[in-house]
Image (cartoon, helix red, strand yellow):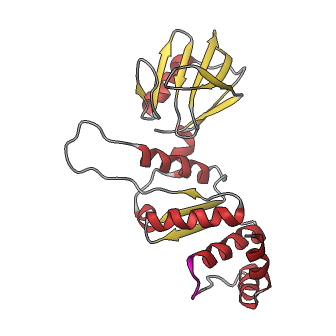
């Protein structure tokens, strides 16, 4: 991949593209590239310009394929902005995984952390929560911080979390005495916070299968579910 990157940087067409973008002569049209070459060009733009980049694809399958190619060149894949899955019939249970993934990516974009984002066109056409409301619903829980546990539970409920006897999936929370468990879409695993009074005495990720702690952490972010 590094060899291909060096080749593209010496290409006169890529040099013209770079000069146009750096000179503010946008938009720039680039045609005739295959998927791998497109990924190479996008990756070099990301690495060279150090600017936020949004990649629009015709559908989710193409977005996933291009994302894998870009990861090969950049060493990291783009954040995926998923489209919401609409259900127009009665059903006992509906998965919210795509919606929660979408919220996580939008929160990263709103927080200026989503520097490289890829999205199918459908995802960009769907209505979204306003940026200020999304940021206002987010909160950070830190080790040693003092919080009103009742207020946190109320905010979790208002943010769409489901209260359960024990957390088994994203978007759920459980409260047992001074122990608060929750799984935010912004976190890779469920989080357990143990309170001593109003102070967070310990924090860590835990395995929802056996409910055992797996890693100690210093902070966790709660976003809408």
Residue lying at 67% horizontally and 76% vertically, measured from the top left? 41
User: Relative to residue 61, is residue 15 drawn left or right?
Assistant: right
Q: Residue furthest left?
A: 90
**Is residue 73 covered in magenta?**
no
Dominant secondary structure of the residues highlighted in magenta in the image = loop
Q: Position of residue 160 (x, y in %)?
A: 42, 34
In which quadrant is the N terminus drawn?
A: bottom right
Would you place residue 22 above or below residue 156 in this image? below
| Viewer-nearest residue: 145 or 14 | 14
Is residue 52 visible to us here? no
| Viewer-nearest residue: 175 or 151 | 175
User: Relative to residue 117, is residue 103 drawn left or right?
Assistant: left
Q: Position of residue 91 (x, y in %)?
A: 22, 40
Residue lying at 64% horizontally and 61% vertically, measured from the top left? 116
The mark tally for this picture is 0
| Viewer-nearest residue: 217 or 8 | 8
Residue lying at 63% horizontally and 78% vertically, measured from the top left? 37
Would you place residue 87 above or below residue 23 in this image? above
Is residue 177 visible to us here? yes
Q: Which residues are magenta?
A: 31-35
């Amino acid at each position: 991949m590094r060899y291909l990157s060096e080749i593209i940087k010496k290409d006169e067409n890529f040099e013209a593209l770079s000069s146009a973008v750096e000179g503010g002569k946008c938009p720039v049209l680039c045609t005739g590239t295959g998927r791998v070459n497109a990924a190479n060009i996008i990756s070099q733009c990301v690495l060279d310009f150090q600017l936020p980049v949004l990649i629009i694809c015709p559908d989710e399958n193409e977005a996933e394929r291009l994302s894998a190619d870009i990861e090969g060149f950049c060493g990291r894949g783009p954040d995926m902005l998923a489209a919401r899955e609409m259900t127009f019939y009665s059903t006992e249970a509906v998965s919210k995984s795509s919606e929660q993934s979408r919220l996580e990516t939008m929160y990263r974009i709103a927080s200026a952390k989503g520097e490289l984002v890829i999205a199918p066109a459908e995802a960009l056409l769907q209505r979204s929560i306003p940026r200020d409301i999304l940021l206002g619903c987010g909160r950070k829980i830190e080790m040693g911080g003092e919080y009103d546990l009742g207020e946190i539970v109320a905010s979790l409920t208002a943010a769409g979390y489901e209260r359960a006897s024990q957390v088994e999936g994203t978007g759920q929370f459980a409260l047992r005495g001074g122990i608060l468990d929750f799984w935010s879409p912004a976190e890779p695993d469920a989080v357990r916070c143990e309170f001593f009074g109003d102070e967070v005495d310990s924090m860590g990720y835990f395995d929802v299968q056996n409910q055992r702690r797996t890693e100690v952490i210093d902070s966790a972010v709660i976003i809408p579910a």
